[in-house]
Image (cartoon, coloured by chain):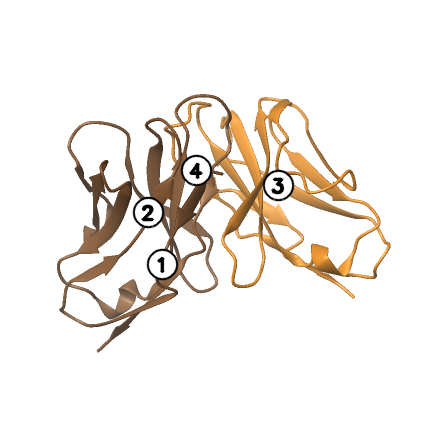
């Protein structure tokens, strides 16, 4: 079965420190990979995506993600966390052949402490 | 510009009643999606529209759930004979094109509570 795993329910990091939110997937073929963020009382917002090409993708608000095909991972990173980065982060995967379903991970709550 | 809007923002209903949830996508967006987000869970795909047709209904959990889209715009998700397990936040998203590599723009959701 196709699935997306975000192994950490919560990540705590101090402001100014680097952060990593992990995502691994089990989807056949070469899927498209996305990160979305959900701030309190706001809808999900797109952060970045990997389609093809360079394995390091840069997105909004200083976030980036590294695609690793051999490990089927797409970890979200930021060199220096801000308190305002505190939110719920979702990894999502879409197949590039057959079907239109987007598979979301369960989400990881990021807390950035001042 | 205007984003995806959903109404109502909150809906409380009694078990066995029917409910209709509305989604207004971003103008001109061809693709429209419905998801369900239960407490502590990720987003569960329900249905995908391409224009007014729904080539992927694979996520609808039962025949009590149905959805339609008219004029390539507004979509309605209907849940008949609601059950307590239907309680969740229902999210709508739209995308300007129908390709699988396009990001989705999400609405604020409708929180459904079935008593």
Pointer 4 indicates a residue of which chain? B
The reply to whether discs 3 and 1 touch (Cβ–Cβ < 8 Å) is no
To the question of a shared chain for discs 3 and 1, the answer is no
The reply to whether discs 1 and 2 touch (Cβ–Cβ < 8 Å) is yes
Identify the mark nearer the N-term, 4 or 3.
3
Pointer 2 indicates a residue of which chain? A
Q: Which residue is mark 2?
A: A24
Question: Which residue is pictured at 79% across the width and 66% down the height?
Answer: B115
To the question of a shared chain for discs 2 and 3, the answer is no
Q: Quadrant of residue A27?
A: top left
Q: Is residue B111 visible?
A: no
Name the disc covering residue B104, or none: 4
Mark 2: few, some, or many residues within 10 Å (few <14, many ≥20)?
A: many
Q: Secondary structure at mark 1?
A: loop
Pointer 1 indicates a residue of which chain? A
Name the disc covering residue A7, or none: 1
Q: Secondary structure at mark 3?
A: strand
The answer to whether residue B50 is above or below residue B89 is: above
The reply to whether discs 2 and 3 touch (Cβ–Cβ < 8 Å) is no
Question: Which residue is pictured at 22% across the width and 37% down the height?
Answer: A70
Q: Which residue is mark 3?
A: B23
Residue B46's spot in the image, x, y percent? 61, 39
| Shade representing chain A | brown
| Shade representing chain B | orange
What distance separates the C-alpha of mark 4 from that of mark 2? 20 Å
Question: Which residue is pictured at 18% across the width and 27% down the height?
Answer: A53
Mark 3: few, some, or many residues within 10 Å (few <14, many ≥20)?
A: many
What distance separates the C-alpha of mark 1 from that of mark 2? 8 Å
């Amino acid at each position: 079965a196709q699935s997306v795993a975000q192994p950490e329910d919560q990540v705590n990091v101090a402001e100014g420190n680097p952060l990593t939110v992990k995502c691994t997937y089990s989807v056949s073929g070469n899927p498209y990979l996305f990160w979305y963020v959900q701030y309190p009382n706001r809808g999900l917002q797109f952060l970045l995506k990997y389609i093809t090409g360079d394995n390091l993708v840069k997105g909004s608000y200083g976030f980036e993600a590294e695609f690793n095909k051999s490990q089927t991972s797409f970890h979200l990173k930021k060199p220096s966390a801000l308190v305002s980065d505190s939110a719920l982060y979702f990894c999502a995967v879409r197949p590039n052949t057959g079907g239109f379903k987007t598979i979301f991970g369960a989400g990881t709550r990021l807390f950035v402490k001042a | 510009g205007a984003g995806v809007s959903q109404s109502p923002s909150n809906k409380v209903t009694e078990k066995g009643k029917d409910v209709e949830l509305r989604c207004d996508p971003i103008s001109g967006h061809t693709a429209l999606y419905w998801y369900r987000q239960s407490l502590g869970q990720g987003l569960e795909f329900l249905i995908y529209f391409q224009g007014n047709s729904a080539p992927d209904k694979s996520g609808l959990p039962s025949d009590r759930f149905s959805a339609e889209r008219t004029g390539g715009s507004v979509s309605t998700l209907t849940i008949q004979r609601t059950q307590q397990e239907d309680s969740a936040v229902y999210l709508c998203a739209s995308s300007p094109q129908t390709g699988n590599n396009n990001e989705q723009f999400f609405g604020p959701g409708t929180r459904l509570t079935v008593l």
